[in-house]
């Protein structure tokens, strides 16, 4: 007996320009349809072909048969007292990812912190995503879907001067360079004028140092780069970022230089340094860090460790954090301290899965717990 299944409709949300053009050619349409439909999806937040009034009725009907625009489902949306907004999104297999919009500069900048994976395989010792283990890579549609959802919920893009999302950082759950094939098309859509039209300086990829993929990225895109360093000696970094045993600090910094050399304009790498009490927050650590970074055009961001249950680490005191900043200053570095935003909705960037760790938790219990956080 033969069974027939309905042909799968193509989800257009995650298609880069080239993929979208290819799709239209494959259904016997002209390439320029790609730009028209991309504008509807990414500028207008549209998910209904019937509303795409600059397409013929026949094409709209055809598209509804062979394609769809399917974003992640919004399970929870919360705002915190400092204006930070957070969305918990349900993706294909019922997993959750979180995305956070953080306002800055008196509302001039709105930075969206985007996730690339459900969980992460790299198991950094101070990271709750790492402790959760790796579940799966997000698809390109699920990655760009986070920007799409945030923009739709803040309001349609009226003009380029008034964008709901002005910056994107790939600093949510997961290691973006371990999901290269889906992250790159999604980032292309962030930069494309018919996508989100963000400048490459306003789109940042953060990595713990997957060196071969960093080299590949430099050949394809020149978005801003943030490196999660956290330690200036291999001995300590091996402990905090196990990937360092494969690609050590020297190898990583050399790859950063190659990346900068490929960028079309003058650029700096952002070095992320999570300060952990009595682990990497002493004067000798500041001195080692300053000496190490002498040769790399970079700026340092200090991130006080964001505690989570059973991490075994503590956050340094405010005084110690300021002392560390002062030591770096005396050594020639102005290193801003990245303040945790949206504390009341558990929305610190890079620390998004605080409440999802227990995978056995029932859906309802999870939703209840984050709603209590938001009160
Ligand atoms: N996997 C990528 C991007 C996601 S993590 C990376 O590691 O760069 C984003 C940032 O948050 C990284 O710099 C990461 O080291 C940092 N981070 C993770 N857990 C943290 C914690 N508990 N406290 C403070 N920063 C943390
Ligand atoms: Fe993965 Fe980044 Fe967390 Fe390390 S810090 S476990 S690379 S998400």
Image (tube, helix red, strand yellow):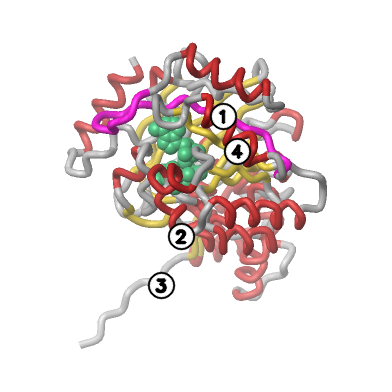
Q: CA distance from mark 2 to mark 3?
A: 43 Å
Q: Nearer the N terminus, badge 4 or badge 3?
A: 3
Q: Secondary structure at mark 4?
A: strand
Classify residue 73 as left or right of residue 359.
Answer: right
Q: Nearer the N terminus, badge 1 or badge 3?
A: 3
Relative depth, front residue between 302 and 205: 302
Q: Does residue 302 belong to the magenta stretch?
A: yes
Q: Position of residue 339 (x, y in %)?
A: 52, 21
Relative depth, front residue between 29 and 105: 105
Mark 2 or 4: the one toward you: 2
Q: Position of residue 343 (x, y in %)?
A: 42, 19
Residue with the mark numbered 1: 286
> What residue span does the magenta drawing correspond to?
296-314
* Whether residue 56 can be seen here: no
Q: Does residue 291 belong to the magenta stretch?
A: no
Q: Is residue 363 above or below residue 92?
A: above
Q: CA distance from mark 4 to mark 3?
A: 47 Å
Kindly indicate whether the residue at mark 3 contacts the one at mark 4 (C-beta within 8 angstroms): no
* Whether residue 5 can be seen here: yes
The circle on residue 7 is 3
Q: Secondary structure at mark 2?
A: loop
The circle on residue 271 is 4
Classify residue 90 as left or right of residue 80.
Answer: left
Furthest residue to the front?
284
Would you say the magenta stretch is mainly helix, strand or loop?
A: loop
Residue with the mark numbered 2: 246
Q: Position of residue 4 (x, y in %)?
A: 31, 79
Q: Nearer the N terminus, badge 2 or badge 1?
A: 2
């Amino acid at each position: 007996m033969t069974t027939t299944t309905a042909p799968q409709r193509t989800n257009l949300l995650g298609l880069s320009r080239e993929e979208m053009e290819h799709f239209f050619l494959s259904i016997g349409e002209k390439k320029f349809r790609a730009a028209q439909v991309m504008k509807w999806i990414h500028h207008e937040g549209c998910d209904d072909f019937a509303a795409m009034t600059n397409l013929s009725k026949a094409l709209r009907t055809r598209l509804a048969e062979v394609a769809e625009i399917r974003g992640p489902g919004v399970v929870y949306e919360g705002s915190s007292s400092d204006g930070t907004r957070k969305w918990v999104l349900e993706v294909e297999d019922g997993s959750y990812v979180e995305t956070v919009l953080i306002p800055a500069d008196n509302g001039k900048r709105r930075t969206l912190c985007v996730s690339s994976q459900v969980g992460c395989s790299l198991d950094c010792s101070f990271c709750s995503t790492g402790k959760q283990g790796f579940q799966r890579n997000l698809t390109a549609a699920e990655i760009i879907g986070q920007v799409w959802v945030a923009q739709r919920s803040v309001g349609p893009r009226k003009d380029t001067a008034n964008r709901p999302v002005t910056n994107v950082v790939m600093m949510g759950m997961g290691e973006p360079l371990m999901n290269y094939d889906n992250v790159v098309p999604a980032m292309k859509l962030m930069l494309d004028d018919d996508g989100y039209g963000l400048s490459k300086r306003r789109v940042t990829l953060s990595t713990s140092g997957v060196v071969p993929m960093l080299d590949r990225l430099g050949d394809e895109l020149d978005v801003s780069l943030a490196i999660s360093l956290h330690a200036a000696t291999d001995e300590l970094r091996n402990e905090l970022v196990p990937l360092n045993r494969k690609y050590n600090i020297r190898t990583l910094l050399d790859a950063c230089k190659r990346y900068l050399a490929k960028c079309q304009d003058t650029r700096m790498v952002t070095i992320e340094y999570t300060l952990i009490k009595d682990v990497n927050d002493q004067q000798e650590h500041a001195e080692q860090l300053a000496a190490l970074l002498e040769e790399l055009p970079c700026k340092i961001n200090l991130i006080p460790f964001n505690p989570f249950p059973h991490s075994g680490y503590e956050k340094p005191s405010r005084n110690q954090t300021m002392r560390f900043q002062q030591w770096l200053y005396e050594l020639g570095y102005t290193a801003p301290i990245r303040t945790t935003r949206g504390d009341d909705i558990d929305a610190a960037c890079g620390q998004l899965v605080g409440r999802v760790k227990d995978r056995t938790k029932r859906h309802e219990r999870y939703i209840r717990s984050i709603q209590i956080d938001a009160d």
